[in-house]
Amino acid sequence: MPMKTTLNLSDSLLADAKALAARQRTTLTRVIEEGLQLRLRAQQSAVKSARVRLPVFRGKGGLVAGVDPLSNKSLLQAIEDDDA
């Protein structure tokens, strides 16, 4: 069931919204509802797109023998050896 409420809108915004409603042959209420629905959907889309799923390599292989994955020094040495 629709609920009645009071909104405080600037005069220019209200005039623009009424003009849009008249051009679209709809009600001011409908224009406001559509605008609010668009804003809420955009917010939900932004939240969903903020979640990033990182790819996971599931192939064979791994570190070169002798490289300690817990040692920065070992990893840097392996990178330097690879560049040479």
Image (spheres, grey):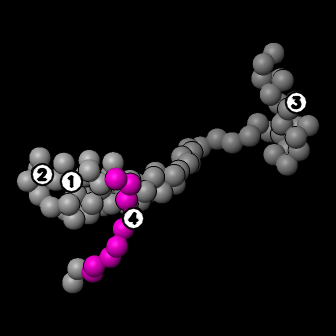
Specify which label sits upstream in the sequence, 1 or 3.
1
Specify which label sits upstream in the sequence, 2 or 3.
2
Query: What's the amino acid at mark 4?
Result: Asn
Q: Residues within 10 Å of mark 3 (few under 14, many from 20)?
A: few
Specify which label sits upstream in the sequence, 4 or 3.
4
Image label count = 4
Query: What's the amino acid at mark 3?
Result: Gln
Per the image, the residue denoted by label 1 is 18
Query: What's the amino acid at mark 2?
Result: Ala
Residue at figure coordinates x 21%, y 53% from the top left = 18
Indicate left or right for 22 with 9 as reference.
left
User: Is 5 a magenta residue?
Assistant: yes
Contact between labelled residues 1 and 2, with CB atoms less than 8 Å apart: yes
Per the image, the residue denoted by label 3 is 77
Q: Residue furthest front?
A: 11
Q: Tell me which segment is drawn in magenta.
A: 3-11
Residue 66 in view of the camera? no
Per the image, the residue denoted by label 2 is 22
Determine whether 36 is above or below 50 in the image: below
Contact between labelled residues 2 and 4, with CB atoms less than 8 Å apart: no
Residue at figure coordinates x 33%, y 60% from the top left = 36
